[in-house]
Amino acid sequence: MFNKKRLFASLLIAVLLIATLAGCTAEPANTGNTGNTGNSANTGDTADGKKDHKIVLVLPGPINDQGWNATAYEGLQLVEKDLGVKMEYLESVQQADFEAVFTDYGEKGYDLVFAHGTQFYDAAIKVAPQYPNTFYMVINSEEGQAPNVGGIGVREWEGGYVAGALAAMYTETKQMGAIGSFPFPVIAGTLDAFEAAAQEYDPSIKVTKTYVNSWEDIQKGKETGLAMAEAGADIIFCSANQVGLGSIDAAKSKGVKAIGYISPQNEVAPETVISSVTYNTPGLFKATVQQLLDGELKAEGKSLGWADDVLDMQWADGVSDEVKDYVNKTIERLKNGEIKNPYKGEN
């Protein structure tokens, strides 16, 4: 009897010891999303008493698109580097899933959800009222809805205007092609501005505008660009995320020129891309997260332009001083408010 008791006690101690060791060495569950940086946002308070925040970036495309989504990822990296705040990201979210994704992050108690594109706005204002403690910030929207939907973006039409001024100085056929994703006001306004600037330089220039109803169909961008070049366009401009890579490829294959847009694309095809009009999108993310940290996020929409240093020129090699002077004067006119948005409404 005595031996049985000792044996039972020994077994009990062994079981407790194993359980204790397992509890000490177990890895925490991974609650991040596909495509997070490996640094999932923390919850609770840090050792210095500051509150950690749960922040996620929702993207309509991949972070390696060399365009719109790539600039957002740069914003995430800037936030982590300069503010020490970890962010997660979710790539290539389809429009049919916008509401479900927003709902999921609201249910999980995220503090801030970045939605990278004006196309997210309708889903945000629908879902947001159900999750008042989650702030939804739509990038490139000029609208907001109290109490927890904001919009911040670049005045894309100003970028399109400068692209048009640049293109006008290079065209020889006086025919250009301008490709947009969808005829949303922000995209249509960009193409209208491109056309207006080109025709301000030379009223005889003609711009063919086409919408491909896609953000990521590179092949569609190439097919559209090829058709434009075959019809006589010798400059191609595109505001449609990944689609733009296809249009640059088309320009290269046809021996015509292209304008880089949103992110530096000069190196995509150095002999084809004249120069790139770029966005300082990362700065929008940093400014928004700083407002979150300071408790100053507001449910409003606002947009920034050349005067706010969120647009820039990435000049390619070989651009003449004459071209640079004309484009820089156009930029100064935009900064001074001398040029008005030429958006014509629904095209």
Image (spheres, rainbow, N blue to C red):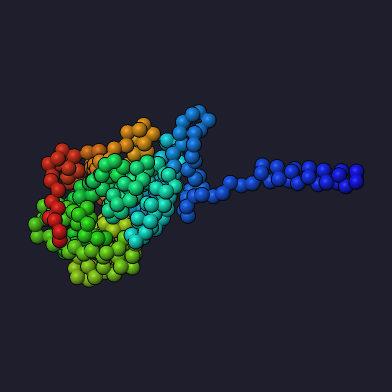
Q: Residue at x 49, y 36 (%)?
A: 44
**Residue 148 seen anywhere in this rendered image of the structure:** yes
Q: In the picture shown, does residue 98 fall above or below 335?
A: below
Left or right of 320, for residue 54: right
Q: Residue at x 37, y 51 (%)?
A: 102
Please tell me in which quadrant of the rendered image residue 211 appears: bottom left
Residue 220 position, x and y percent, is 30, 68
**Residue 170 seen anywhere in this rendered image of the structure:** no
Decide which of 208, 342 is in the foreground and name it: 342
Instruction: Please give the count of numbered marks on the rendered protein.
Output: 0
Q: In the picture shown, does residue 223 fall above or below 44?
A: below
Q: Residue at x 30, y 63 (%)?
A: 214
Q: In the picture shown, does residue 181 fall above or below 337?
A: below
Name the residue furthest top. 48
Q: Residue at x 16, y 55 (%)?
A: 192
Decide which of 20, 227 is in the foreground and name it: 20
Residue 325 position, x and y percent, is 19, 44
Quadrant where the C terminus is found in the figure: bottom left
Left or right of 184, for residue 17: right
Decide which of 328, 242 is in the foreground and name it: 242
Name the residue furthest front. 1
Residue 253 position, x and y percent, is 31, 67
Please tell me in which quadrant of the rendered image residue 79 appears: top left
Left or right of 131, for residue 199: left
Q: In the picture shown, does residue 288 fall above or below 32?
A: above
Name the residue furthest left. 203
Residue 270 position, x and y percent, is 34, 57
Please tell me in which quadrant of the rendered image residue 66 appears: bottom left
